[in-house]
Amino acid sequence: QVQLEESGGGLVQAGGSLRLSCAASGRTFSTYAMGWFRQAPGKEREFVAAISWISTTYYADSVKGRFTMSRVNAKNTVYLQMNSLKPEDTAIYYCAEASSPGSVPQTMGLYGVWGQGTQVTVSA
């Protein structure tokens, strides 16, 4: 069973940048898609970005052009570079591993392993 641990969250002013990391341990994740989701207070968890095992990426419309997801399989790590941050990006950010190798879902239910999350707060 793989374990996921996010890091890199924090407090930043609007317009700033943060880079989130998600490190996997327990086994290699190189053949699985990975995703980033976020949950703001009082809202449902929502899709942010996903990356296939060959690094094809998908983004929610709300973050396209501002966020970039990447992975380094040799390090069992995925990243989320977040630029031009807005107050509405404030949320707990979670990384997750897809349940089936080869698929690149954008739906929460198709991810089987989740990290504990990291808080991102963007001040106006």
Image: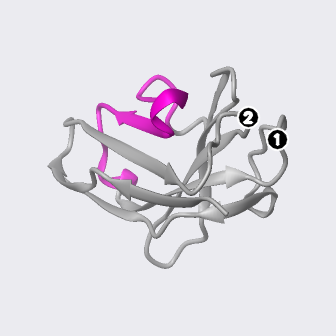
Q: 103 and 60: which one is in front?
A: 103
> SS at mark 2?
loop
Is there any visible trace of residue 72 in the rendered image? Answer: no
Residue shown at the point (40%, 56%) measured from the top left: 6
Q: Rounded to the nearest whole Å, what is the CA distance between mark 1 and mark 2? A: 6 Å
Is there any visible trace of residue 90 in the rendered image? Answer: yes
Amino acid on which the number 1 mark rests in the picture: Pro
Residue shown at the point (72%, 40%) measured from the top left: 32
Q: Which stretch is magenta?
A: 63-89
Amino acid on which the number 2 mark rests in the picture: Thr
| Disc 2: which residue | 31
Q: Sequence order check: which comes first, mark 1 or mark 2?
A: 2
> SS at mark 1?
loop
Residue 38 rendering spot, x and y as whole percentages: 51, 59
Task: Give the number of the disc on residue 79.
Answer: none
Which residue reaches farthest bottom?
42
| Disc 1: which residue | 101
- Residue 88 is a magenta residue: yes
Q: Is residue 26 above or below residue 32?
A: below
Residue 10 rendering spot, x and y as whole percentages: 21, 57
Q: 17 and 101: which one is in front?
A: 101
Q: Residues within 10 Å of mark 1 (few under 14, many from 20)?
A: some
Count how many numbered circles sit on residues in the image: 2
